[in-house]
């Protein structure tokens, strides 16, 4: 008979690496070709120019609440390009949006190609995110689990949507997965390499988004919980010293805590380096706080106290706490206080349904949690809880984009059982050795069921990724009615982020339309992309009118890249009763008003 071989043996070799390479290349190809056809989105408008401005001036005074890493890295290729940015006005700016305005004026002819250069850096970060997802899942669940996780990360519509944009979300996702991987290393093999790796991940996460600071609290809290659990196990064992069970006797908590302290210090140093030590360790009385909470705390502390963070970074925390006025939209309802269940609904309607189904199956198959899994679930759960409770910026599922790779890793849990399936034609030695044939049969049946589910879900993910191309930003799953019904649940960057000016120009060229009445949601003037238009409502109706989905359904913003912001959410309500001639990229509605 053939030697005993399992599925894990098969994917542990060159075939597994080939599949991983194919998945990674497919993800990069899908996201890269999709984003090349999308116009500059709202937040990109200021992010890339701000990064270029910092490189040219070394001035961080606008980086209060604006993540620097997702701006600085994509701007690197522009330093060697023809991009122009006069550094002189920078000192007088009060907002990074002014950098976007200046960059637009100075680079009209090459505007979109320059942004494509920056987007390629983000695309590389998407690739890193997918590979880190595979690496952590493989470490936790073996080669089969790693490959399964890679499928759901590489083909995730939300990762494909935001993974190639010059925005912070994919950078934070990569840093969180890297931090979980490094934390697992530190826990199992405490030492300076793991500590430095974790510290770098923590620093990069904080430089990617202020949310990353929460990891500085989450990981020590996890370590403390694990420590208390081990001490309780010691007491239950009643065998102190070397007579304790090996699983407990090998624990060296002093090394773990020293490594954790080194990681925290490394992370803080990296934050200072990221801001070039701009205002590092400033006195507390040098800050003028805008938020009530920060001002109250500052009054309770002595003014001579040194703040262990760069000035713009710490001021950014205050700026984020003081921000208000974000209009939230969920299930047809607007408010300015947000919704507790916003992100839960978002996950249900903007994630392929096979993802939550497999996540439940992965839990049901083996309900106990390892410590690596506790860290994974607790980190994702606490961050989701933070965003849900704060209800601060209910303007896009992208704020919890990091949940996509974490869910993929969790689904990799199915790989532990699938991996033991024996290949056809091999000797079933494991079954022969098992004295309890009935239990072995049950395990075999469950493994075959999991394999069938995983294969079907992987096929569905591939179909979804291909069929949704290139309109990933507007993706909604079929159970919610797809993108055409997306406005019933969510608006803003979930559906329309100003990404389809290129689609509009192509439509006008196909239809022979010289000019169109337009209300476009975005910062970029449509003429930059060759769209000839008149402001919708500025005169008697023309034959064709085009309206961005957000404006049509009541989410108001700057119109056509001008300073005009309609105050009434029903400004364009009359068009909701009309049947559109076309819906471009699911985000721009075109109406034919006269024959």
Image (cartoon, grey):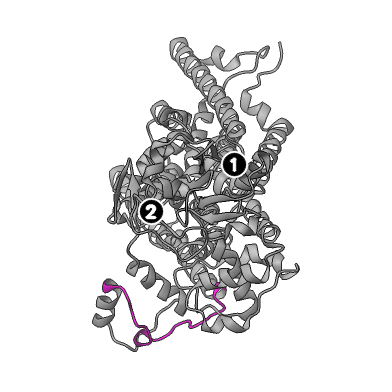
Number of other residues with Cα within 10 Å of mark 1, as a class: few under 14, some 14 to 19, many 20 or more: many
The foreground one among 87 and 102 is 102
Q: Earlier in the sequence, mark 2 or mark 1?
A: 1
Element type at marker 1?
A: helix
Q: Are marks 2 and 1 in contact (CB under 8 Å)?
A: no
Residue 44, picture quadrant: bottom right
Near-viewer residue (430 or 512)? 512
| As drawn, 254 above or below 290 | above
User: Residue tagged by mark 2?
Assistant: 222
Q: Which residues are magenta?
A: 274-292
Residue 278 among magenta residues = yes
Asked which secondary structure carries label 2, the reply is helix
Q: Dot 2, crowdedness within 10 Å: few (<14), some or many (≥20)?
A: some
**Residue 175 in sight:** no
Alpha carbon distance from label 2 to label 1:
23 Å
Q: Position of residue 373 (x, y in %)?
A: 44, 42
Instruction: List x then y, in percent, for residue 90.
Output: 57, 80
Q: Quadrant of the C terminus?
A: top right
Q: Look at the picture and state if 409 lies above or below 241.
A: above
State the residue lying farthest toward the bottom. 304
Question: Where does the image place residue 585, in percent across and percent down from the top left?
Answer: 56, 41
Find residue 433 and report its image quarter: top right
Q: Which residue is mark 1?
A: 134
What secondary structure prevails in the magenta region?
A: loop
Residue pictured at 51% horizontal, 25% vertical = 417
């Amino acid at each position: 008979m053939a030697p005993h071989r399992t599925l894990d043996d098969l994917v542990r070799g060159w075939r597994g690496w080939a599949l991983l390479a194919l998945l990674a290349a497919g993800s990069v190809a899908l996201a890269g070709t999709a984003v090349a056809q999308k116009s500059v989105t709202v937040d990109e408008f200021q992010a890339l120019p701000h990064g270029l401005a910092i490189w040219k001036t070394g001035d961080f005074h606008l980086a209060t609440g604006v993540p620097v890493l997702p701006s600085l890295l994509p701007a690197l290729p522009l330093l060697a390009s023809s991009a122009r940015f006069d550094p002189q006005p920078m000192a007088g700016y009060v907002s990074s949006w002014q950098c976007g305005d200046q960059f637009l004026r100075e680079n009209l002819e090459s505007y979109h190609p320059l942004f494509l250069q920056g987007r390629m850096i983000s695309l590389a970060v998407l690739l890193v995110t997918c590979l880190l997802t595979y690496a952590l899942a493989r470490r936790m669940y073996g080669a089969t689990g790693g490959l399964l996780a890679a499928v759901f990360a590489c083909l995730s519509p939300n990762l494909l949507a935001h993974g190639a944009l010059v925005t912070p979300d994919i950078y934070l996702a990569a840093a969180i997965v890297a931090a979980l991987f490094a934390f697992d290393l530190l826990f199992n093999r405490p030492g300076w390499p793991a500590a430095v790796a974790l510290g770098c991940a923590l620093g990069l996460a904080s430089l990617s988004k202020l949310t990353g600071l929460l990891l500085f609290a989450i990981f020590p809290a996890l370590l403390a919980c694990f420590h208390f659990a081990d001490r309780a196990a010691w007491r239950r064992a009643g065998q102190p010293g070397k007579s304790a069970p090996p699983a407990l006797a090998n624990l060296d908590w002093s090394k773990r805590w020293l490594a954790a302290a080194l990681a925290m210090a490394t992370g803080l140093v990296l934050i200072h380096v990221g801001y070039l030590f701009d205002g590092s360790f400033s006195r507390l009385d040098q800050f003028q706080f805008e938020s009530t909470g920060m001002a109250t705390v500052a009054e309770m502390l002595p003014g001579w106290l040194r703040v262990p963070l760069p000035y713009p970074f710490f001021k950014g925390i205050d700026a984020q706490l003081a921000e208000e006025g974000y209009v939230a939209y969920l299930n047809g309802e607007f408010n300015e206080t947000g919704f507790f269940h916003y992100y839960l609904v978002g996950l249900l309607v903007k994630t392929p349904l096979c993802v939550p189904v497999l996540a439940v199956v992965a839990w049901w198959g083996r309900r106990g949690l390892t410590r690596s899994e506790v860290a994974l679930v607790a980190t994702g759960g606490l961050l989701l809880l933070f965003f849900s409770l704060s209800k601060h910026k209910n303007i896009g599922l992208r704020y919890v984009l990091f949940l996509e790779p974490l869910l993929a890793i969790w689904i990799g849990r199915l790989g532990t059982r699938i991996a033991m399936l024996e290949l056809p034609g091999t000797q079933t030695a494991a079954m022969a050795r098992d004295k309890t044939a009935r239990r072995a049969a049950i395990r075999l049946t469950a493994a075959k069921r999991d394999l069938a589910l995983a294969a079907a879900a992987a096929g569905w993910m591939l179909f979804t990724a291909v069929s949704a191309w290139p309109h990933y930003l507007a993706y909604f799953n079929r159970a919610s009615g797809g993108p055409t019904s997306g406005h019933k649940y969510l608006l803003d960057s979930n559906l329309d982020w100003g990404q389809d000016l290129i689609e509009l120009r192509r439509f006008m060229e196909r239809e022979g339309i010289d000019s169109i009445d337009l209300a476009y949601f975005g910062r970029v003037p449509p003429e930059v992309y060759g769209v000839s238009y008149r402001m919708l409502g500025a005169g008697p109706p023309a034959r064709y009118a085009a309206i961005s989905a957000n404006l049509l359904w009541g989410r108001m913003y700057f119109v056509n890249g001008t300073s005009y912001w309609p105050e009434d959410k029903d400004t364009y309500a009359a068009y909701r009763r009309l049947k559109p001639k076309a819906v471009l990229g699911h985000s721009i509605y075109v109406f034919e008003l006269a024959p």
